[in-house]
Image (cartoon, helix red, strand yellow):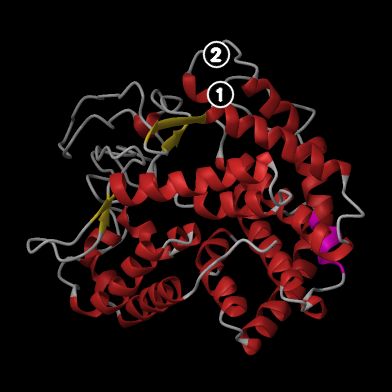
Amino acid sequence: MYDAGQLLMVPLHAAFTLHERNWMQQFSGHFAREFARFEAAQRNGKAEDRLGRLQYVYLSSRFLVLAAQSGKEELIPTYLPSVLYREVERVWKQEPAWQWGRKPFAGGMKERVLWKLSDPKTKKNYEKAITDEELFLFAIAADLRTYERETFNGSIESPLITDVLTVADKAFRKGVKFRGKGRWVFQPGVWSDHPDYLYAGRREKKRNMKPAPVKDIAWDTSHSHRFPLWLLSLSQAQKEDSPQRSFYETLRKGMEKQFYEQVLVQPTREFPAYRTKNFIDGRNGVYRWGYQSLGPNNGYGPYELSGTLLLGWWTFLDSDRIRHVYGKMAHQLPSIVSVAGIYNGPDEPLKHASSQQQLKLKELLMNLSGGMEVKIKD
């Protein structure tokens, strides 16, 4: 579910943006099959892990919005909207929400987020971090609000969805810190004492090196690549000309500037491919040193989170210059096998970089990301 949620997002949007009827129908059939299985697994107590589940549910909520906005409601499986509403309600208010350093919140994710926003005293900064789980749920709820507006013309609005979006607004207004010229980062410093970030001050990988935490470190670029679409969902959910719409559009523009001007690294003669720095504030230190799946004395060195660039999600910032980057990457990929290992990171064999199947997938995502515009529809 997790991989599908990542890899299918750009093709899903391309299906509707490029008016590929066959692709749309294939996605419709896919969701009809998968959500029948999804519901059966829920009833049998065999649900996927929550993060993977939410990432996939977000893929389906985007499908719901795209089909409704395109006037193709017949593609939406009959039970899909109700399944999504139930999932939001269950995670937001019913399912206990885990939390570092304490017992789970019995009142669900809402209780956990409100606790984090109350500036509680914690042993670790990261215990107050708004996580990708929560941001996925905010975005799913936003998509359901957009679906309500498309389907009921604003006459019906779920109180549940309003509740989630109200808290989401508080989280973003509290967490966003502007850095000048409209650029911003989210909750800088909150991850500084998390094990994944303890070596962010190291500029190269060395055996047995000591931690070097950075007090105001921002999110890593791997997790940050979801922000463009999260922000699109949240912006679409707001009424046109409302302060909330203006707020999220300001964040979209600021994120584009932050990414393009501080994170993206242009090709050079020495390294003829696009790369990204490891952290969204433009720092490029070591990430996840000694992480369980990587083993001791291993982690992501400078630029080694560049692989998420190839998922294509930065195109959802709807920027001509980012589309241009993806268009150039689509033409570059077959000819840069010698340096393409940077897109794999330390946990994948370098031979994957030159496999025909891998290259075809990457080329497809780059071509689609470079060739479609994702606009706000009012």
Along the horizontal axis of the image, is 186 left or right of 354? right
Indicate whether 150 appears above or below 197. Answer: below
For numbered disc 2, what is the local secondary structure? loop
For numbered disc 1, what is the local secondary structure? helix
Which quadrant: the C terminus? bottom right
Q: Residue 63 at what x, y percent from top left?
A: 68, 68
Q: Earlier in the sequence, mark 1 or mark 2?
A: 2
In space, the residues marked 1 and 2 are separated at their CA atoms by 8 Å
Q: Is residue 315 visible?
A: yes
Residue 3: mark in rendering: none
Q: Residue furthest top?
A: 121
**For the stretch drawn in magenta, what is the main secondary structure?**
helix
Tell me the amino acid under the disc marked 2: Thr
- In the picture of the structure, the residue carrying the numbered disc 1 is 128
Residue at figure coordinates x 51%, y 70% from the top left: 373
Tell me the amino acid under the disc marked 1: Lys
Q: Residue 210 at what x, y percent from top left?
A: 21, 24
Q: Nearer the viewer, residue 221 or 175?
A: 175
Residue at figure coordinates x 37%, y 44% from the top left: 258
Q: Residue 198 at what x, y percent from top left?
A: 32, 28
Q: What is the magenta range?
A: 79-84
Q: Residue furthest left?
A: 270
Q: Quadrant of residue 266?
A: bottom left
Q: Is residue 104 visible?
A: no
- In the picture of the structure, the residue carrying the numbered disc 2 is 122
